[in-house]
Image (tube, helix red, strand yellow):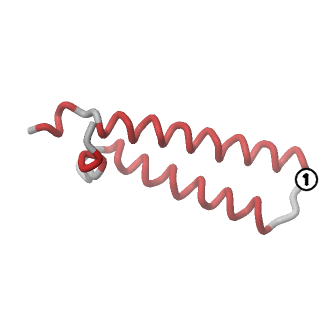
Amino acid sequence: MKFSRLFQPRNPQFWLLIVLNGLSSAISWILRTHDLPNAVTWVLAGFALSNVLLGLWIAIRLMNDDAARG
């Protein structure tokens, strides 16, 4: 597993990882700056946590990608 394999702009998973990280950041910012009802807060927090877990899974897949070995 190499950290340098994480940057793969030609791989669609790389761009999905970027989008998920941006979405998690945006949701976290909304949760911190707005006073939302509890149900909405829990739903958004669930989305943010699932984005983090999915992003971690994609990052591990990218770092273990055999196609990047060239």
Question: Residue 51 at what x, y percent from top left?
Answer: 57, 43
Q: Residue furthest right?
A: 37
The number of numbered badges drawn on the structure is 1
Q: Residue furthest bottom?
A: 33
Quadrant showing the N terminus: top left
Please tell me which residue lies in front, 48 or 12: 48
The relative height of residue 42 versus residue 57 in the rendered view (above or below) is: below
Question: Residue 5 at what x, y percent from top left?
Answer: 24, 45
Name the residue beneath numbered marker 1: 37
Relative placement, left or right, of 7 versus 43 is: left
Quadrant showing the C terminus: top left
SS for dot 1? loop
The relative height of residue 46 versus residue 66 in the rendered view (above or below) is: below
Q: Quadrant of residue 18?
A: bottom left
Residue type at the position of mark 1: Pro
The residue located at (48%, 42%) in the rendering is 55
The residue located at (71%, 40%) in the rendering is 46
Question: Residue 34 at what x, y percent from top left?
Answer: 82, 66
Q: Residue furthest left?
A: 70
Please tell me which residue lies in front, 65 or 39: 65
Relative placement, left or right, of 63 versus 50 is: left
Relative placement, left or right, of 45 versus 65 is: right
Relative placement, left or right, of 9 versus 28 is: left
The residue located at (39%, 41%) in the rendering is 59
Q: Residues within 10 Å of mark 1 (few under 14, many from 20)?
A: few
The residue located at (76%, 59%) in the rendering is 31
